[in-house]
Image: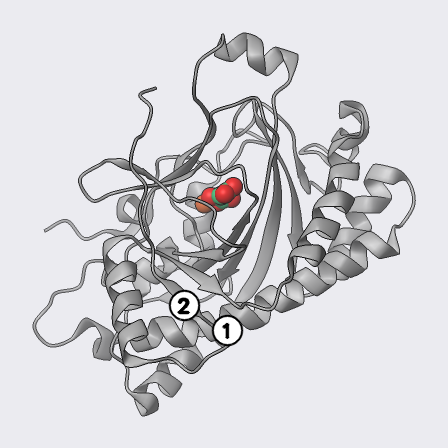
Amino acid sequence: MPASQTSVELPVLDISQPLSPSSLSSISVACKEWGFFQLSNHGICPDFLKRLQFLCNHIFMLPSDDKLKAGPSSETKTYTPHFIASPFYESLRVSGPDFFASAQSSSEALLNHPNPEFSDVLQEYGSKMTDLSRRVIEIVLECLGAAADLGRKLSAEFDNCQGYFRINNYSSSREAEAESMQLDEVEGLGMHTDMSCITIVYQDEIGGLQVRSKDGKWMDINPSNGNLVVNIGDLMQAWSNGKLRSSEHRVVLRRCANRFSTAFFWCFEDEKVIFAPHEVVGEETSRLYKPFVCADYLKFRENSEKGKFEKVGYTVQHFAGIKT
Ligand SMILES: O=C(O)CCC(=O)C(=O)O
Ligand SMILES: [Fe+2]
């Protein structure tokens, strides 16, 4: 895999401040060009993230057989083991709106007992991310040029959105190293687009997240000052008639370092029919996507093979794109 040399400068939105016209314009450009921007002053403090990481590492350090008690063939199915998405990637899924209950059922399966401290922290993370996601959706709608009245009407379409998050641990094992045979750079998570409306990512200081430019070049998204990374997902790309870009991205690992990240996915409800509102499409442009039911797209992306990760390489374009 060729090493990537370039990083992208993504605008940073200070979410604690009212949105200024200049900030709105730089975020709009970033959503269209890259489908990515950053958030600062998001209210999730470094100590809290360290605590979250510490509690999750406790889970990731369990023996593999114990972790499989929440694996793809278990009842909870919240743990994705190594060698499904990649040899270097494992992850724990926490589903909302009751993040506490979801975390509690994972810890019961994994540790044979509930762990209220772990579940409390995951609940707090889930609920903070839910609030942030709602605010980010309002801003993204403003990026589409929605004036206040229209913005309120359009944001009602997102009222029943649901969130879940994945806690991701990237590490190397002897088996994984044998496979990579001393390569300088390996794929920790392959190229994909997210199936969300928006995703909010926290990555630790190791780095490795990359976005694919419109001309197919991989660009680093370097970790910066505890900022969170927001990206547009496929559901939003379709709903905005392609005005906002759901970009392909991946994670590369360059050293044998452990990497920790969380990705919070804010998605339409399963039964929602995704059809760009005519105010968003405008008079002059034609529709790029056929209407589709959200759950049908999620099913399309799931591999039929049991326990496999969401299909990498398939997007909403393949599923609902209107060929022009
Ligand atoms: O680990 C990361 O930084 C990003 C993960 C990601 O893209 C995903 O889980 O969809
Ligand atoms: Fe992603």
Identified by mark 1, the residue type is Arg
232 is higher (above) or lower (below) than 56: below
Q: Which of marks 2 and 1 is nearer the N terminus?
A: 2
Say left or right for 131 vs 198.
Answer: right
Question: Disc 1 marks which residue?
Answer: 134
Identified by mark 2, the residue type is Leu
Residue for point 31% across, 21% down: 2
The extreme right residue here reads 113
Query: Between residues 4 and 309, which one lies in front from this camera angle?
Result: 4
Query: Where does ligand 2 appear, by image quarter?
Result: top left
Question: Disc 2 marks which residue?
Answer: 13
289 is higher (above) or lower (below) than 112: below
* Residue 207 x %, y %: 48, 38
Say left or right for 161 vs 311.
Answer: right
Colouring scheme applied when the structure was drawn: one colour
> Tag 1, which secondary structure?
helix
* Residue 195 x %, y %: 43, 51
